[in-house]
Image: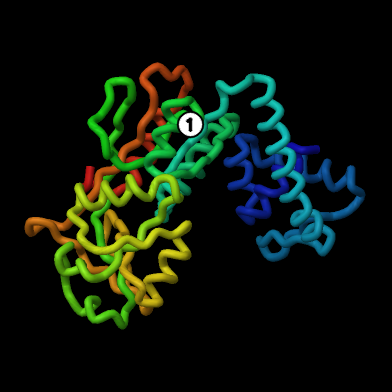
Amino acid sequence: MIKQIKYFQAIVRHQSFTKAAEECYISQSAISQQIQALEKELGIQLLKREKRKIKLTEAGEYFYRKSLILISDFDRLCAETIRLAKGEEDEIIIGYLRHYRGFELKETITEFQAKYPEIFLQLSQGTHEELYEYLRTNKADIVISDLRRKPSDQYVNFFLTKGYIYAELAINNPLAQLEKITANDLKNTPIILIAPQQQRCSEEIFYREYFGIKSDFIFVENLEEAHLRVVSNKGYFPIEFNHSPEKSKIFKYVPIMQNENQMYRKYYVFWRLDTMKKYIEEFATMLKSRFPEETK
């Protein structure tokens, strides 16, 4: 019955027996027979045709809604069972930066799981230092992070994109009137960063030495708190885009300049050279394809 329910869902989704049959790789007559068999087993009509349109009966609407939950649970049950039977080789643990806010990772996960539904993806977020530790201790198979160290020959360093840095300022902040800004212009405006207590010292050193930040530091626990601090005019939040930021009624994004060029940070996918897990490079390639071509 599971296959019959999936055929039924495909017909409802496409509003067409022909398109549903193509998706399910069976003939139109075969899918029609399967739906008839399903209706016969249930003893009710699920679909009706009116003027070349497919409509659900009242019972069909109820069955369709509940069947979506049923099939989702069934697919998850099968995937988890297979994963447990095969062990960790069919699991990939992905680490990503805590302040990541783009759609690229979400879209890549969607594409990858559609192609490899048997592979279980587990996600873990952290700071740069936490992600490095996850990778070093095998608590993550791949991590998506910025490059702060000299690349190690123990890891694959797979370039993704450049994140161009902007100062996120409250729209009513006088500095928001500037078209571009420097670290010196911001020396009297605190910089707001996301970092746990034990890593705040290293984050401050990195920003002072690498970006030349001269202002005071305000550390927060999460992205939402950072945005609220900005709105309250408590400082600015360094935020990165690999494209032009969208206009906002709350924030103004001003490019931060260094030596006449906009500051940027390079992002990579890292994984161990000695990993035996499949599909890691394919996942990284899928992710890279979602970033603007000019930044590669």
- Give x and y (percent) for residue 70: 76, 46
Three-letter amino acid code at the position of disc 1:
Ala
Residue 25 seen in the current view = yes
**Left or right of residue 260: residue 91:** right
Q: Quadrant of residue 86?
A: top right
| Quarter of the figure that contains the C terminus | top left
Q: Residue at x 71, y 41 (%)?
A: 31
Image point 20% across, 48% down: which residue? Answer: 209
State whether residue 292 appears in this view. Answer: no
| Residue at 47% from the left image edge and 64% from the top image edge | 224
Extreme-left residue of the structure: 260
Neighbours of disc 1 within 10 Å: few (<14), some (14-19), many (20+): many
**Residue 178 x %, y %:** 17, 75
Q: Quadrant of the N terminus?
A: top right
Q: Is residue 251 above or below residue 225?
A: below
- Residue 130 placement (x, y as % from top left): 43, 39
Q: Residue at x 35, y 76 (%)?
A: 233
293 or 63: nearer the viewer: 293
Count of marks, rendered view: 1
What residue does disc 1 label? 140
Report the front residue among 71 and 108: 108
- Camera-nearest residue between 168 and 16: 168
Rendering coords of residue 97 (x, y %): 41, 46
Examine the rendered structure and indicate whether residue 86 appears above or below residue 123.
above
Vertical order, 4 against 59 (above or below):
above
Left or right placement of residue 238 versus residue 16 in this view? left
Circle 1 — which element?
loop
